[in-house]
Image: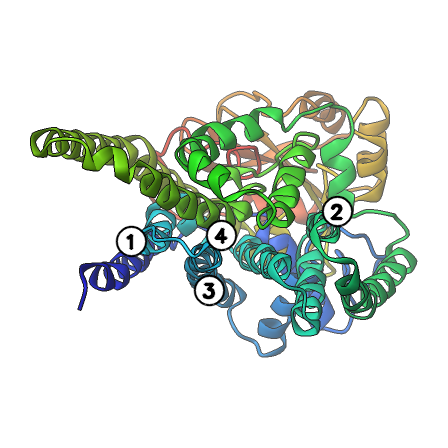
Amino acid sequence: MSRETLWRPLLVAGGLVALGYQVAAVWVFTADDSYITYQYSRNLAAGWGPVWNAGEPPVEGYTTFLWMLVMAGPHLLSADPVLCAKVLGLLSTVGALLLTYQFARHLQRTWHTSASGVWPAVSVLLLGVLPATAVHTVSGMETALFTFLLTALLYTVTLCAGEVTPRRAYGLAAVGLLTGLTRPEGNLALLLACGALWTVTPRERRGPLLRALLLAYLLPGATYYVWRYWYYGHAFPLPFYVKTVGETMAGWPHVVHYLWSLVLPVGLLAAPGLRSRGLRLLLPAMVPAAGLMAFFVLPKHLMGYESRYLYPLTPALMAVGMAGVGETLRLMQPWLTMRSHRERSLMLATLIALIAARTIDHYERGVAPTIARKQAYGLCLNAAHVALGKYLAGFPGPRPLVGFNDAGAIPYFSRWRGLDLWGLNDATIALHGKAEPGYSDYVLGRRPDLVIIGSSSAAEYKPTWPWEPGLHRRLLAAGMACVKVVTYDEGSYYLWLFSKPQSDVGRYVAAWEQPAGDRSRQGVGPARGPGG
């Protein structure tokens, strides 16, 4: 057995072991927004259709139709949706890592290169030790599934760049459809990929490609879009309006951070090797990658923890990058052979020292803090939002209306009717914004029985979002008072619960005793926010 043959499975196994270790460490983390999708899934499973509040006109507050359908399964079977989502996330992530290896190996085989085959395995190792991989695996969101499908899309279009066959063309169209149904930007990725593929495909092979896209993507995709427009009445899901209205290029800092921290370090090493092989084969995969990064300059990255919106590009970029690094080192081989044994030993020792220093720095500044933040987030969410939601579920009588910014676990577990103060699940707020006095007029006009707003202090009201002070004043003027303060993060974030003190809801909420526990995890921040 050659040394290379031995190292490849060891590196892949190392990546999977690192992933497993970090998944176990952050298993408690479940994003509050994941419960939004579960609410639609539960209502679908119960026969109400994919709606926010059962029995009310439909609104589209989720952006992942396929994941919503998948998560209806656990509700039909009375299984734990959170556990099912984490298991499916783990399967999707492992699939994405194995596809990454296959993607990089395909590039090496196509190039007929003599570069080491170890580098595709290194791509799996790097993804496995990246804390973002584990976080998105267990978050309960659709991110892991979208990552797998986007990786499959970019890999398949690269196969088609080598040769378009009917099987590959239909595979590309089918994967593109599933990717677009998982996240709307998946449609942008497919269209850009096909546009680039069209330019590098011989004229005689364009017919099968066009036919496959028409039958397996455009027709079913158009059918779905016509249905959702008829059902919901808007061109885009409501989160699109919330994230794009009011600010221009709000996502620019997140895109720059992603490029600086991940793409550039690998890209600079890979660039000489990739340039030596030409860009024709890579063009159909790299154009959609660049297009998605350009698109995400525009919207706010709400709940954008660990580059959630850009991370799905990472496996494909890592596959291309590691294949390119192998080529770069192959090009350097003649220069290295001219060095003396002492010089090569010195360079190797320097490289090992740099890698060791970078690994230690990565763990201390990246892995450990990320794991700690996500553990704290999960524990805080369970102690506040989940516990409160389960208590509210015991309220006797008709379902009251509750307004909140953290519109996830509380409405899901309480089964109360929800008024999303952010607007992700409310068409009026999503389309008209939160400007006063119209915003507070609308919220109070809905006659909520309970309103939950955030404060950074338990003793005095200190708002956490810019639209809360005006709403706070109107709540007091309407005769509502804070009947309970719930601790989410001791010293940092509290939920202030407003109701009419003498109402049935007010008395029921005031009687709740929050379970005791360690909530001294300062810096976790609100359950919904850019940092998650």
* Residue identified by numbered label 3: 95
Q: In this image, 530 relative to 368: left or right?
A: right
Q: Which disc is residue 425 wearing? A: 2
Quarter of the image with the N terminus in it: bottom left
Answer yes or no: do the residues labelled 4 and 2 have beta carbons within 8 Å? no
Identity, as a three-letter code, of the amino acid under mark 4: Ser
Give the image location of residue 358, x and y in percent.
Answer: 26, 31
Q: Considering only order in the chain, which callout, 3 or 1, is on the residue closer to the N terminus?
A: 1
Is label 1 in contact with label 3 (beta carbons under 8 Å)? no
Q: Label 3: state its secondary structure.
A: helix
User: Vertically, is 310 above or below 299?
Assistant: below
User: Foreground mark, 2 or 1?
Assistant: 1
Please give left or right for residue 427 compared with residue 65 in the image: right
**Labels 4 and 3 touching (C-beta < 8 A):** no
Disc number lying in front (1 or 4)? 1
Tag 4 secondary structure: loop
User: Residue 149 versus residue 431: which sits nearer the camera?
Assistant: 149
* Position of residue 120 measured from the top left corner of the image (x, y, whole percent): 37, 54
Mark 4 surroundings within 10 Å by alpha-carbon count, few (fewer than 14), some (14 through 19), many (20 or more): many
Measured as percent of width and height from the top left, residue 220 is found at 82, 68
Instruction: Name the secondary structure under disc 2.
Output: loop
Answer above or below: position of 250 versus 6: above
**Callout 1 environment at 10 Å: few (<14), some (14 to 19), or many (20+)?**
some
Between 60 and 136, which is closer to the camera in this rendering?
136
Q: Which residue is mark 4?
A: 139
According to the image, label 1 marks what residue? 18
Q: Are marks 3 and 2 in contact (CB under 8 Å)?
A: no
Mark before the other along the chain sequence, 4 or 3: 3
Q: Name which residue type carries label 2.
A: Asn
